[in-house]
Image (cartoon, helix red, strand yellow):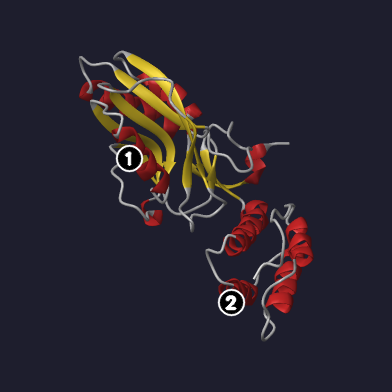
Amino acid sequence: MDLSNDIAEILVSEEQIQAKVAELGARISADYAGQEILLVGLLRGAIVFLSDLMRAITIPIRLDFIGISSYGMSTDSGAVRLIMDLETDIAGKHVLLVEDIVDTGKTLAYLTENLKTRQPASLRICALLDKPDRRQVPITVDYVGFAIPDKFVVGYGLDFAEGYRNLPFVGVLKEHLYKEVVMRGAILQRINRYLSREITLAQLVAWAQETLAAGGLSPDDDRLLRDLVDLAGKPGSRGLTIEEWADLLARLGQELRVSTGPLL
């Protein structure tokens, strides 16, 4: 299987990446001349970029990693949490966060606020890719490789379902390969938001109806949303029973986790 067959277009070539990494390494070396910097890689997507970037930097460096998780497959909730912390005490150190791609800015905003409380001497961000059109939270990226359009990209460390990281370029994944998975994640996230009482039943049903009207769903997703609307959208409906929720979530590959009683 040739992974490149799954790519609709190459957005940034291997040669362009190599040239940009060399340029960034030279800039960083000049900006921090006479100092030692701590490179902090964001797992897991930044590993490939970081491994090349560190070899393009000519001043002394130290290395550490940090892990961040965003809730669900969309950014609606904005929930971000730390899943692996640094081993290094960064107080008084010059820290350079290395990221593969900047999207909404929520993850980096959370992370920079967290790290600032640890009193580093300085804190800057270096990202290979930036999607400025997707920004929801203001964030300053000090070193940017490439500004790119809002397309679904993989390669050079960026993945889809843990695949494609090993491609030497950044490419746009063919739409049919990710569309159904992304929609499944969106459906699951909306249901979870209702179950955690972030949105009302009426809002969940309205979203399902709008999604159905937009079309383009797989047969399974279309049927699932229609069943949801039929069960929850009837006049006077107070919601689904535990058994009905369990059935819907099982079709999404998930288990229902509640205590007792119907979900209102």
Q: Quadrant of residue 90?
A: top left
Q: Nearer the viewer, residue 150 or 182?
A: 182
Residue extending farthest to the bottom is 235
Residue extending farthest to the front is 260
Q: Which secondary structure, mark 2? A: helix
Q: Amino acid at mark 2?
A: Ala
Q: Residues within 10 Å of mark 1 (few under 14, many from 20)?
A: few
Residue at horizontal 21 percent and vertical 18 percent from the top = 33
Residue at horizontal 61 percent and vertical 59 percent from the top = 192
Query: With 262 as the anchor, is 196 left or right in this view?
Result: left
Q: Residues within 10 Å of mark 2 (few under 14, many from 20)?
A: some
Query: With 263 as the anchor, is 130 left or right in this view?
Result: left
Quarter of the picture holding the C terminus: bottom right
Q: Amino acid at mark 1?
A: Glu
Image coordinates of residue 76 in percent, x first then y, are 48, 58
Image coordinates of residue 245 in percent, x first then y, are 73, 64
> Alpha-carbon distance for marks 1 and 2?
36 Å
The image's mark for residue 113 is 1
Among the two numbered marks 1 and 2 on one chain, the one whose residue lies closer to the N terminus: 1
Image coordinates of residue 15 in percent, x first then y, are 45, 31
Vertical placement of 212 versus 68: above or below?
A: below
Quarter of the picture holding the N terminus: top right
Residue at horizontal 66 percent and vertical 53 percent from the top = 181
Residue, disc 2: 202
Image coordinates of residue 124 in percent, x first then y, are 29, 33
Q: Which secondary structure, mark 1? A: helix
Vertical placement of 144 versus 94: above or below?
A: below
Query: With 205 as the anchor, is 65 left or right in this view?
Result: left
